[in-house]
Amino acid sequence: MFADLSALPPDALLGLTKLYNEDPRAAKIDLGVGVFRTPDNRTPVMRAVADAQKALVERETTKVYLPPEGAPGFGEAIRSLIFGDALSAERCAVIQTPGGCGALRVGAELLRRADAQSVSIGAPTWANHKPLLSAAGLNISMIPYYDAPSGRIDFDAFYAGASKLGRKDALLLHGGCHNPTGADLSTDEIDAIAGLAADKGFTPFVDCAYHGFANGLDADAYIIRRLAEYAPEFLVSYSCSKNFGLYRERTGAIIAVGADAGRTAAMKTHILNIARQIYSMPPGHGGIIVAGILTDPALNRSWRAELEEMRLAVIANRRRLVETAARHQLGDRLSYIEEQNGMFSLLPVTDAEVLALRERHGVYVAGGGRANMCGVNESNVDHLCQALADVMAR
């Protein structure tokens, strides 16, 4: 049966991690996979997560399946965290999924069942968006979003592309900390897209993978809360990987907002049916931890405080890179990075220069120049800037 299957090439990003791990050089820098890192290159367990996990282990008496919706309390806690008072509970269904990737795939399957004609995505986007959505049989079209020479959004082009969408189309939106560019829509631009969605009738699909890392939890929820005012229905994929540090626990949610309670209830039945066909029940550990943190006042305060520390650390890394670059013959060529948000930015390098960074200097950057700002720190920023000055075209 499998004789005609040829081996596929390794995943580019995972392959990059393997190359980094095998590199014997001491002065090497990993700016690849998107995880938070401390200055000593660790990705620690968050304090609130450790406390919630300890409490869970002490009281847990069974490993029986979770309900299809997820861990008890998880859905309501996530709904309250994201929407606040912006949306009634009857119009919102939250179903726990295996990570944000699981949410994206379930959402894609729901769109296919609704006979979606296409999903438009601003270019560039996270490398796994197109595979996850197209695997459900959806047609994917890319529209302009980012202007690399300026390091800023080309909003006029993005708006023009979105304005061509109709009632059987969906528009994927990044819920802050755009991956891979770090360039986020302003509040005025979000308002314009939300108004356009209401006017044209297309379905927004917000991928919220870095909630809290841009401007804080409430500010980062602006796009979702604004859509709750404008759009009669939309979808949100939510990931707890970054803001709870639960990468390996695969904890996320697909959130369906319907025009009314009846529409939402119908959407939920389809989501549960889709989930049953793909993975049946969500994993328990991470969902129980998130629910515990969000419903316990002390753990909630601890989590919010540490998340804010992480957010400020990434901002400091961006500033450190821009200031150091100016001292290494790069002038203001990286100045746009300080204006952006979250883990990622695109360095102004070609693919050939990405290869030169790796081979000559042990600097590991993903294809297209995507760099994880969490990997920048006081001890390696001079080496990074020297490497960039060496390989970048003058």
Image (cartoon, helix red, strand yellow):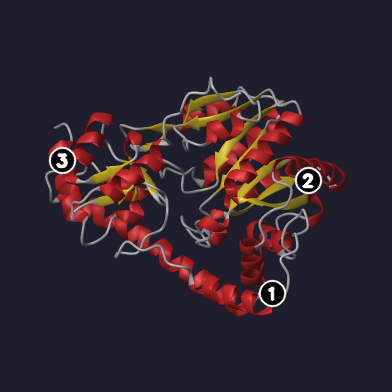
Q: Is residue 312 left or right of residue 359?
A: right
Task: In this rendered view, identify the residue nearer to me: 341 or 343.
Answer: 343
| Dot 1 or dot 3, earlier in sequence | 1
Q: Which residue, as the protein is rendered here, is positioned at the far right? A: 262
Q: Quadrant of residue 196?
A: top right
**Which three-letter amino acid code belongs to the residue tagged 3?**
Arg
Label 1 residue SS: loop
Reply above or below: 277 against 54.
above
Q: In percent of the image, x 70 and y 56: which residue is there?
A: 86
For label 3, the residue is: 360
Q: In the visual, does 8 lie left or right of 192? A: left
Q: Distance between the residues labelled 2 and 1?
A: 26 Å
**How far apart, in angstroms, are the residues tagged by discs 1 and 3?**
51 Å
User: The disc labelled 2 sits on which kind of residue?
Assistant: Leu
Label 1 crowding class (10 Å Cα cut-off): few <14, some 14-19, many 20+? few
Amino acid type, mark 1: Glu
Which residue does the image show at 76% across and 51% down from the upper left? 92
Q: Please count the marks in the image.
A: 3
Q: Compared to 168, does 219 lie above or below? A: below
Q: In 3D space, how far apart are the residues under numbered discs 2 and 3 (Cα atoms)? A: 50 Å
Q: Residue 60 carries which label?
A: 1
* Residue 134 percent across, percent down from the top left: 60, 28
- Answer whether residue 138 is visible to the viewer in this image: yes
In the image, is 265 to the left or to the right of 380?
right
Q: In the drawing, what numbered circle is on residue 272?
A: 2
Q: Which of marks 2 and 1 is nearer the N terminus?
A: 1
